[in-house]
Amino acid sequence: MLERHSFGHESLKDRLASFAKDVREKAALLPPGMEQDELLRKARHADTAFHMDEWLSSPGRQPPK
């Protein structure tokens, strides 16, 4: 059975920033290697999604330069 997560009134940007921070903290506790690299990759993806959401929701959107 699929587990549903409840985020309350937390915005997408808040959830992405929190996720990236948590993942980076976990990665910092690991020795260098594949597992740490994977966690850091997930944090970078969350950062990218954060910035994309920020750009998409901005009033004067312009294409990336």
Image (spheres, helix red, strand yellow):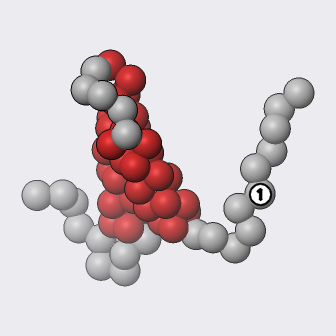
| In front of the other: 5 or 25 | 25
Q: How many marks?
A: 1
Amino acid type at image mark 1: Ser
* Residue 41, quarter of picture: top left
Q: Is residue 12 left or right of residue 31?
A: right
Q: Can you give x and y, in whole percent of width and height, for residue 5 in the image?
A: 76, 50
Q: Is residue 12 left or right of residue 39?
A: right
Which residue of the protein is positioned furthest toward the top in this rendering?
A: 34
Q: Can you give x and y, in whole percent of width and height, for residue 31 in the image?
A: 30, 28
Q: Let me know if residue 46 appears in the view.
A: no
Residue at the image point whose x is 28% and y is 21% from the top:
33
Q: Can you give x and y, in whole percent of width and height, for residue 16 in the image?
A: 48, 57
Disc 1 is placed on an element classified as: loop
* Residue 64, quarter of picture: bottom left
Residue at the image point whose x is 30% and y is 78% from the top:
60
Which residue of the protein is positioned furthest toward the bottom in this rendering?
A: 59
